[in-house]
Amino acid sequence: MGGCITSQRERSPQPVRRVVSESQSANNFSANSESREVTNGSRYEGAVAIGKNQSLKKERLRWRSQVAMTEGQLKQKREIFWETAPAYEGKKEVWDALRAAAQAAETNDWALAQAIIDGVGVSIPSGTLLDCYDELGTRYQIPPYCLSSPLNLISDADLGKDENKSTPVKTGKDVAIKLRFSDSDKDVKFPVNTEESIASLKKRVHQSVRNVDPLDQRWFFGGKLLQDRSRLSEFKIRPGYVIQIIVKAPKPASSPLS
């Protein structure tokens, strides 16, 4: 009898699954204090999205900050992220494009946002800008606070109303301090009351000293950043003491994307 010949079936190749390590993320914000929640009710946990590229979903990201923030704090937080993100990983031109796309999406200009990310070859498997990949597979993560405002955002107008409603005004001391601006070598004498809030003082500086928006002023004393709701009396500031004011430099005009 002839020998029995067995044939091996050709095994169909297993699909290759693209896995991106968490360590690739230059901006892993899973440890941030914000709770992330998208409009369809699912929760974003910082997991890597795997799949083919999708079009940008035309829906706002809805999320709530564990600690309520003001419009000024949100603006400052965004500036810090966009200025430091390219220093970690990825191409600066891609980060700049993602920033422009995020700003366009926040104003509901979805067509422009899609055109921007397509122009730099960025794919978004999740359909949102939370997780993005360039043509080389480098991962770019954008935190929720750069894509939309939190549901519990405190407007600066409401903050001012709260200050005006503040009950009995504490009688502080009237003293004269010196203001030292980051873009000037001359100190400016400035009369204050020790029970004034930093937010109120910023407004007075804008109105009577220099035309610098309160949101573009950062006050420091003894190397410590003075928060808007703080009062001078908390820092034991005496007559003649110098407060440093860091003035945010205006951004140079950028050419429109071609």
Image (cartoon, rainbow, N blue to C red):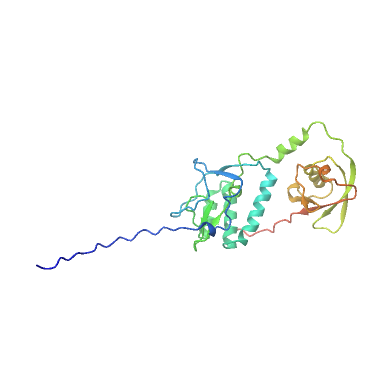
Quadrant where the N terminus lies? bottom left
Residue 218 at x, y percent in the picture: 76, 51
Residue 181 at x, y percent in the picture: 81, 55
Farthest residue in the bottom direction?
2
* Residue 170 visible in the current orientation: yes
Tell which of 162 and 98 is nearer to you. Answer: 162
Taking the spot 74% from the left edge, 35% from the top edge, the residue there is 162
Quadrant where the C terminus lies? bottom right
Residue 241 at x, y percent in the picture: 87, 50
Which image quarter: residue 82? bottom right
Residue 7 higher or lower than 206, as above or below: below
109 left or right of 80 in image: left
Which image quarter: residue 167? top right
Residue 138 higher or lower than 175, as above or below: below
193 left or right of 53 in image: right
Q: How many marks?
A: 0
Taking the spot 41% from the left edge, 58% from the top edge, the residue there is 17
Farthest residue in the top direction?
168
Tell which of 213 and 61 is nearer to you. Answer: 61
* Residue 257 visible in the current orientation: no
Residue 256 higher or lower than 45, as above or below: below
Residue 93 at x, y percent in the picture: 58, 62
68 left or right of 258 in image: right
Taking the spot 48% from the left edge, 52% from the top edge, the residue there is 49
Farthest residue in the left direction?
1
Tell which of 62 and 101 is nearer to you. Answer: 62
127 left or right of 185 in image: left
